[in-house]
Image (cartoon, rainbow, N blue to C red):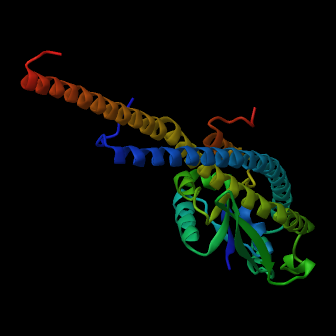
Amino acid sequence: MYDIAVIGDRDSVGGFAALGMHVVPAESADEVRSALQRMAQGSFAVIYITEAAAAFAEDLIDKYRDEPLPAIIPIPGVRGNTGAGMRSVSRSVEKAVGSDILSK
Amino acid sequence: MAILNVNPTRMELTRLKGKLATARRGHKLLKDKRDELMRRFLELVRENKELRAEVERSISAAAEHMAIAGASMPKYALDTALAMPKQGLSLEVETKNIMSVDIPVYSPKFKTAGEGDIYSYGYALTSCDLDAAVRALADVFPQMLRLAEVEKSCQMMAAEIERTRRRVNALEHVMIPNYADTIRYITMKLDENERSSTARLMKVKDMMLEQAHHYKS
């Protein structure tokens, strides 16, 4: 049995608690990184992270890209969409095909 | 043009011919695997893009409701309302094998089945915008889960495609030419040995005839 975690600033992630997800408020780079490390080692299969928070821990997220668990998925926060999530999809395409053929 | 470091013997030649046949077969299989992986990947990645756009739109909409809720009620009330969730959520993870990539399949298990259990607060002290925000998040949750599934699969398949492509290229441009060149080299070396021993025998024959009968052929 695995759990789902949400990492990000309090305003963005608060609502997910009502759905029964494990909410970890984290604002600073240190908080985000240590939370993400702890979650990734624990019993979490899916970790949603706000794009703003994901920017602090790109190297950690990259490390788990090819691992089966956990899936670290960027989501937009209350302060809007930075496009980081879409860029990560484009990176997968680039890795597989050699160039980003789907976005224009 | 690179020749492997082997002895030019018949045994080595047979061994290399076997290896070349295996490499050719492996190359063909891996190429097929790469093409099929690529087809599946492109299908999946298109779904990924659509799903992500949809999820991002829905979450942003929910965040708007949340922002209004946060503005229309005191902060401590909002925090208390969400502090003790009634609903619990855990995840069962199975894997599905697509072209030797183990992609995850998630099935959520809710602690309570009730539709209204996402509202973990009394309605007296909270704004209706909070209800709307929570409702919107609950509605987008199945898509979020599917997004996690698809996105993880895409990442893993991309890695597998990269690996497979590297293998195909290594076989096509390094291993197979090397084997072919070495086989050619051994064949030529063996032929050359044959010719040189024939020449030597002819020479010996001439010398023996000269010794026995004292004439030159």
Can residue B190 be seen here? yes
**Residue B113 position in % (x across, y down):** 88, 82
Q: Is residue A23 left or right of residue B182?
A: right
Q: Who is closer to the viewer here, A54 or A25?
A: A54
Q: Who is closer to the viewer here, A87 or B32?
A: B32
Whether B66 is drawn above or below B2: the answer is below
**Residue A63 position in % (x across, y down):** 53, 56
Whether B90 is drawn above or below B202: the answer is below
Q: Who is closer to the viewer here, A3 or B67?
A: A3
Q: Is residue A73 left or right of residue B10?
A: right
Total marks placed: 0
Report the residue at 53% width, 43% height from top: B166
**Residue B217 position in % (x across, y down):** 18, 16
Can residue B123 be seen here? no
**Residue B185 position in % (x across, y down):** 36, 32
Q: Is residue A100 left or right of residue B144?
A: left
Report the residue at 67% width, 76% height from top: A2
Report the residue at 65% width, 46% height from top: B34
Figure quadrant of the C terminus of chain A: top right
**Residue sitting farthest toward the top:** B216
Figure quadrant of the N terminus of chain A: bottom right
Task: Find residue B211 and report its image quarter.
Answer: top left
